[in-house]
Amino acid sequence: MLKKFLKYSIPSSLSMFISSLYTIIDGIFVGRGVGALGLAAVAIAMPATIALFGLATMFAVGGGTLVSKNFGAGDKDKAVYVFRQAFKFIIILSSIISLIFVIFAEPVVTLLGATEKLRGLSAEFLRYYSLFCIPSLIGITLNGFIRNDGRPKLAMVSSMMGAVVNVLLDYVFIFSLHMGVKGAAIATGLGQVVTIAIILPHFLNKRGQLTFGNVKLETKIIKEIFTMGFPSFFAETAFSIIIFFYNIVLGIYMGEKGISSYSIINYITTNIYMMLLGVSLGAQPLISYYFGAKNTKKMFTTYKLSLRVSVVVNFIFAFICFIFGRKIIGLFTSDIELINISYIGLNITNIAYFITGLNLSTSMYYQAIEMPKFSNLICAFRSFIFLPIILFTLAHFYGTNGIWASMIFSEILSFVAISIFTSVRINTRKAISA
C-alpha cells in the first residue's frame, strides 16, 4: 500500500510543488523587476487567480472521483462518459470566465480591495492572466484526469515543462522587454499552453482508458461532477477568502508594506499548500477506486498515509524556512524592514500548515467517498466562520504578530470542530452501505 500510495502522491506533490515554484519565480521577477508595488498588485489579484484554479480542480477532482469509482466497479464506459462531459463543460465555462475577467478586470480588483495606487497594476495583471484562462483551466483539469487514468508521472512531467517555459519567458518579458506585471501573466499562460501540448497526446492517441469524444451535455452528470468536486473549489475559494481578509486587515494596520509582506509570504507558503494539496490529490484516485471496489481497509490505509506524509512534508518545509527564510525572502526584495517583517510572519504562518494538511486530507477523503457535505463543512470552518473573527480580534489586540498567528487558531478550531461533528469511520461505513 505504501508503494502504491507513493506512486501517486510523489508525482502529484512534485507536480503541485513545481506549479507553485514557478509562481514563486514570478514573484521574484515581479519583486526585482517591478518592485514592491508590483508584488502588492499581484497579491490583490491572487484571490481571483486562485478561484480559477479552484474551478479547474473542482472538475478534475469531481470528475476524477467518479471516473476512478467506475473503474473500481468495472464500468469503463461510464468512466469515459463522465470524462467527456467534464471536459466539454470546462471548455465552455473557461471561455465565459475569460471574457468576463478581461472586460471587467478593474471592477474585480476594486472589489478585492485594491487601493487607488494598486488598482491599475492589479487590473493589468488580471486582464492578461485571464486571456489564458482557457488553456489554464483545461491544463489543470486534464492533469487531474491523467492521474485517475494511471499516469501520475505524465502529469508531473507536463507541469515541469510548463514551469521551465514560464521561467524563461518571465525573464524575457520582465527584464528584457520590460513588460512589467503583464509579462508575468503572459508567461504563466504560455507555460500552461506547453503543459496542454504534452498532455493531449495521451488522450488523442488513446494511450489510456480515457479518450475524447463528442457528447451532449447531461445536466445530471454535470451536477454530479459539480457536487463531488465542489469542496475542491470551496477549498481554493477558502484560500482566496483567507487572502482577501488578510489583505484588508494588513491594509488597515500596515498599509502597502504589509500587503507586500503578505504577498512574499504567500509566494513562499504556496509551495507547502500546493504540496499538501498534491498529497491529498495523490490519495484521491486510490481512495475512489477502493470505494468503488468496497475495500474499506485499503481506503483507511490510504487516508492514514496521506495524514502522515503531510506532517512529514510540513516539518521539512518549516525547517527550511526557519534556517534559510531570510535568504529566501531576500530573493524577492532588498528592503531590510520588509525582510524582517516577512521572516517573522513566514515562520508563524508555517505552524498553521501542520493542521492545514490534516484538514485538506480529511476534506479530500470525504470527496473520494462521495460525502462532499463534510468537505464543504471543513472549508466553511477554515475560511469564513472562524478566520474573520480571530483575525480581526487578534489584529486589534496584538497587532502584526496577532495577524500572523490568527491562521493557527483558525485551522486548529476547524480541525477540532470537524472532529466533533463527524466521524471518518462511521461515515465510511454509511458510504459503503449506501
Image (tube, rainbow, N blue to C red):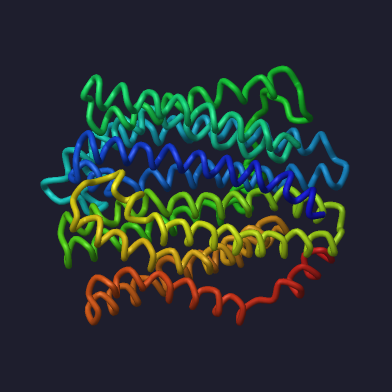
Percent position of residue 139, x then y: 54, 31
Residue 126 falls left or right of residue 348: left
**Front residue of 333 and 62:** 333
Point out the image quarter for the C terminus: bottom right
Image quadrant containing the N terminus: bottom right
Which residue is found at the position 67% from the left and 48% from the top?
A: 9
Q: Nearer the viewer, residue 14 or 383?
A: 14
Res 135 seen here: no
Q: Farthest residue in the top direction? A: 205
Residue in the picture at 20% in, 50% down: 114
Q: Image point 36% across, 33% down: which residue?
A: 130
Residue 342 locus on image (x, y percent): 29, 59
Image quadrant in which you'd find residue 345: bottom left
Number of on-image labels: 0
Horizontal side of residue 224 vs 254, given as left or right: right
Q: Residue 249: x percent and y percent?
A: 24, 66
Q: Is residue 147 left or right of residue 133?
A: right
Please give the name of the residue rendered at 63% of the width and 44% of the height, measured from the top-left corner. Answer: 12
Image x and y of residue 166, in percent: 42, 28
Q: Can you name the residue that lies furthest to the left here? A: 116
The answer to whether 358 is drawn above or below residue 10 in the figure is: below
Residue 251 or residue 275, whichever sits in front: 275
Relative to 149, say whether 13 is above or below.
Answer: below
Asked if residue 336 lies left or right of residue 7, the reply is left
Can residue 285 be seen?
Answer: yes
